[in-house]
Amino acid sequence: MELVDLADFSVDSLEGTNTAARWLAERLEPGAMVCLSGDLGAGKTTFTRALVAALGSPALVSSPTFTLVHEYDGGRVPIIHMDAYRLASGAEWEAAGLAEYLEGRNVVLIEWPEQIADALPEACWRVTLTDTGPESRLIHISSPLGGGRGGL
Ligand SMILES: Nc1ncnc2c1ncn2[C@@H]1O[C@H](COP(=O)(O)OP(=O)(O)OP(=O)(O)O)[C@@H](O)[C@H]1O
Ligand SMILES: [Mg+2]
């Protein structure tokens, strides 16, 4: 039987989002991929900021909407942060170097994974954020089925 690790956090502050990010950080292994879903402003970049800190990196996290890719070092594993919002297809994403990043021993985080679903591996941690108020969010996290890029 597949074991699925999952959690639901109903948070009312940034500190609550930090707590959810720490829960995930404890489970991420080198080679893991994390798909971050949610509407505009739901908190994908903010969750990434919390996750990067929880992985021990002092890097300043900002949205890679225009640059497509940011890399953060200094934590227990190198982190690649991507934003597919502006990409039309998986082919475009391949050109941006996704395959190379996925072959490495880093943790790969991607915002708007739905944009390039055809280019993504199935084995991905899923984080879904829902805005329920000015500072409150529902954060659903589930592990990849069958391991692989989940690093399980
Ligand atoms: N508990 C919370 N968790 C996450 N973000 C929060 C929370 N409370 C308030 N916010 C605010 O909500 C906003 C979320 O913006 P953010 O850029 O992280 O969203 P996003 O999902 O990455 O958007 P985009 O689709 O444009 O990339 C930030 O201004 C953040 O400070
Ligand atoms: Mg963002």
Image (cartoon, rainbow, N blue to C red):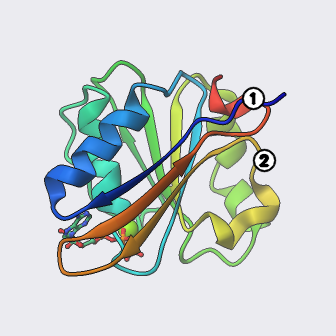
**Quarter of the image where the N terminus is located:** top right
State whether residue 45 is above or below residue 114: above
Q: Nearer the viewer, residue 27 or 69?
A: 27
Residue picked out by circle 1: 148
Q: Position of residue 141 (x, y in %)?
A: 51, 49
- In the image, taking residue 73 as reference, residue 102 lies left or right, namely right
Q: Residue at x 55, y 68 (%)?
A: 112
- In the image, taking residue 150 as reference, residue 23 lies left or right, namely left
Q: Residue at x 41, y 81 (%)?
A: 40
Q: Residues within 10 Å of mark 1 (few under 14, many from 20)?
A: some
Q: Position of residue 107 (x, y in %)?
A: 51, 33
Whereabouts is ligand 2, in terms of quadrant? Answer: bottom left
Query: Three-letter amino acid code at disc 2?
Result: Glu
Q: Confirm or reject: label 1 Cβ below 8 Å from ligand 2.
A: no
Secondary structure under the numbered disc 1 in the rendered image: helix
Mark linked to residue 55: none
Q: Position of residue 3 (x, y in %)?
A: 71, 29
Q: Residue at x 23, y 46 (%)?
A: 18
**In terms of image quadrants, where is residue 91?**
bottom right
Residue picked out by circle 2: 122
Q: Is disc 1 in contact with disc 2, using a CB cutoff of under 8 Å?
A: yes
**Quarter of the image where the C terminus is located:** top right
Q: Residue at x 63, y 56 (%)?
A: 96
Q: Residues within 10 Å of mark 2 (few under 14, many from 20)?
A: some
Q: Earlier in the sequence, mark 1 or mark 2?
A: 2
State whether residue 107 is above or below residue 15: above
Residue found at the far top of this picture: 76
- Real-space Cα distance between discs 1 and 2? 9 Å
Secondary structure under the numbered disc 2 in the rendered image: loop
